[in-house]
Amino acid sequence: MSNQKFWDKIAPRYAKVKISDIESYHKKLQATQEHLTKDMDVLEIGCGTGMTAIAHAPFVHHYHATDMSEVMIDIAKGRAKESDIDNISFEVSDFSSLQIANESKDAVLAMSVLHLLEDVHDGIREVASKLKPGGLFISSTMCLGDKMWYLRAVVPLMRLVGYAPSTVHFFKKDDLLSAITSHNFSILYEWQPSPTKACFVIARKM
């Protein structure tokens, strides 16, 4: 099953799942919003059902949210309409087909995305190309290679029964940070609630 078909299939169920660590989620929202301003044009890659996009949109000029799943985007559009948010645009797109001009965005978000890409370096390079000089890259990434290596044996079984996407990387936090800085970013803020939680990073394009 392709990644797009996987996310289309699970989207309705995904939309109903409550955030397991709401305290950490709110801390990430707050840390992000401290770096946002009302004149910013922001891009989010892999926006899912739009919860984070809707939370951040009131703090910026315009928010463009993308996801490879058309079903996810449909749910996100409905949520934005219900929330009366009118400065969000949506696009069905993945990393390889973004219709975004280079150096046009003040910030790019990729939340729970990097460990699901075919090539994390290609993904970060694409992010850098869309950012203006000095723009912000904000990400939250599971570093499964540190304390959750045992899932290597579980993920293929989950994939067989349709509960895991086709690509899941098991890199470590140090590998993630090194990948980000290797593409002309300086890390402004890094936080991980615990070794089994996602690593949250705010980095600036140099």
Image (cartoon, rainbow, N blue to C red):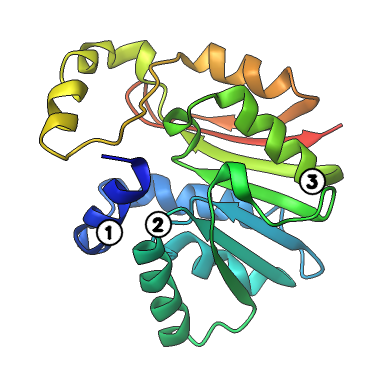
Callout 2 secondary element: loop
User: Does the residue at mark 2 contact the one at mark 1 (Cβ under 8 Å)?
Assistant: yes
Q: Which callout, 3 or 1, points at the residue further toward the start of the chain?
A: 1
Of discs 2 and 3, which sits in the foreground?
2
Q: Can residue 189 be seen?
A: no
The residue pinned by badge 1 equals 11
Residue neighbourhood size for the residue with mark 3, other residues' Cα within 10 Å, grouped as few (<14), some (14–19), many (≥20): many
- Residue drawn at point x = 60 percent, y = 42 percent: 96
Seen in the picture, residue 107 relative to 202 is either above or below; the reply is: below
Q: Decide if residue 65 is on the left or right side of residue 83.
A: right
Of discs 2 and 1, which sits in the foreground?
2
Estimate the spatial distance between the alpha carbons at disc 2 and disc 3, rounded to whole Å: 23 Å
Q: Amino acid at mark 3?
A: Leu
- Residue drawn at point x = 25 percent, y = 47 percent: 20
What is the quadrant of residue 197 in the picture? top left
Callout 1 secondary element: helix
The residue pinned by badge 2 equals 69
Residue 93 location in percent, x, y? 54, 55
User: Residue 183, labelled with which disc?
Assistant: none
Residue 56 location in percent, x, y? 58, 65
